[in-house]
Amino acid sequence: MRRSEARTRWRPVRMARVAVAAPLSRMREVLAQVGDAGCVEFEGGPDLKAFADAAVVRDGVAALPGWMPEPAVAALADRLAPLGGAVMPLPHPRGVQAPSLLRPGGVRGSINMLVETYGAVPYADVDPAPLAMAAYMLMFGMMFGDAGHGLLLLALAGLLLSGRLPRLRRMWPFAAGAGVTSVLFGLLYGEFFGPTGWVPVLWLEPMAEPIPLLLAALGVGGLLLGGAYLLGSVNRWREGGWPLALYARSGVAGAAAFLGVGLVAAGWYTGLGWLLGGGIAVAVAGLGLVLAGFVAEGGGVTQAVMELFDVVVSLGSNVASFARLAAFGLTHAAIGAIVWENTAGLWPSPAAVVVFLLGNAVAFALEGLVVAIQALRLEYYELFSRVFETEGRPFRPWHVPLEGSACPSGSSEVSSPSLPSSSSSLSRS
């Protein structure tokens, strides 16, 4: 049971295909309760004519097919029973993708926007929201490493959580996570509102050791890309079985090619011949699987070779993209150093305080915005492009709330047609 529950946490909410059935004479009341519950997406479309076209009417009873979260089926059935309505299970049709709903509520519901902004997660895929959040915060902190600025982000998170800015309250986990990682990297860099010397350097000074910082950034990028390939392989298997998982460039084949190139680089750097040879073998095997996959798609050998060349080039360019983790970390440290040097040069004049406050305010606001965009760019273009190959269909429940009620499904996308004034539209179908 616990293993099954753990698996369900890493996938979109399980959907059930159902039919909402009721006598024609009670259908209006039943639909009122369904609309108030806001947890059923009827087939056909959001308008009543589409509902009627999709309905099945027999012996004075109408049934409307649709989708709803499986955990909500029992509650809706209990709600409709006093009105003579019922929620009947239907088989999942082959070749039809169920709508996708990421797990709502709490912190998990807040971080879903990181994935939903990119697109709807396919129903068969793993829900990557927690992992995507962790990767985003790691990249943000590496580029925004300053313990003082991180504390300001934590203060901002507290302000958002307090509800004083209700429209932005959902953003508090992002501010909190970014604040924590910025403080940690700030301590590693010895940065506290710049190189003030108020905290010790636990790892390296970005301005003094740019090459080790660059190598670390490329290493972090390699690990994140490896995780994206692993997750992509799982998704390809869930989408199309082992053939798709094995031959896809975002599946096992692409992962093997990426791993092989990494082993080749490690063997060259360390001078270990066995590591270099093993890397070449793994890379060749992965590229061979990729080539076979392209040929199997029917594009021809010439096109497959061109696609293979693109894969080889992208393996290096994708890792190189993560050099920006070091570049923007250096930029942030350079701005902090300029502000602190000018502050120290003006001290003890009151102008020193002004320069320190204004300089850090500009660095915090400007660099925070730039780093947030750059981390999002790496997340979407380098990581999500391997995790996803197709786009899912978002769950859009039919929602006509009664006074004082709210949609409990957690979906932010709802359709709200008006209720029918009679059962005539259904009885004609």
Image (cartoon, grey):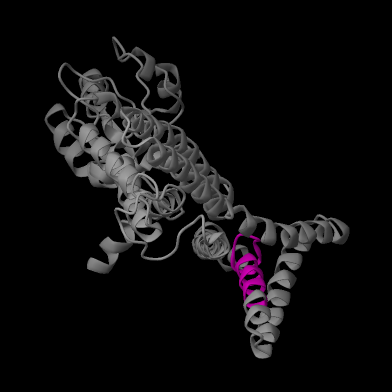
Q: Is residue 289 above or below residue 368?
A: below
Find the magenta span and give its range. Answer: 247-264
Look at the image and say whether residue 248 sits in the magenta stretch: yes
Main SS of the magenta part reads helix
Q: Quadrant of residue 288?
A: bottom right
Could you say which is closer to the camera, residue 402 or residue 322? 322
Q: Quadrant of residue 48?
A: top left
Residue that extends furthest to the right in the rendered view of this protein: 302
Q: Is residue 81 above or below residue 288?
A: above
Residue 376 visible in rendering: yes
Residue 212 appears at what percent x and percent y? 54, 65
229 to the left or right of 404: right
Could you say which is closer to the camera, residue 212 or residue 283? 212
Q: Could you tell me which residue is drawn at 49 percent across and 56 percent down? A: 206
Look at the image and say whether residue 28 sits in the magenta stretch: no
354 to the left or right of 324: left
Residue 147 appears at what percent x and percent y? 32, 50
Q: Could you tell me which residue is drawn at 68 percent across and 72 percent down? A: 286
Residue 10 visible in rendering: no
Residue 3 appears at what percent x and percent y? 27, 68
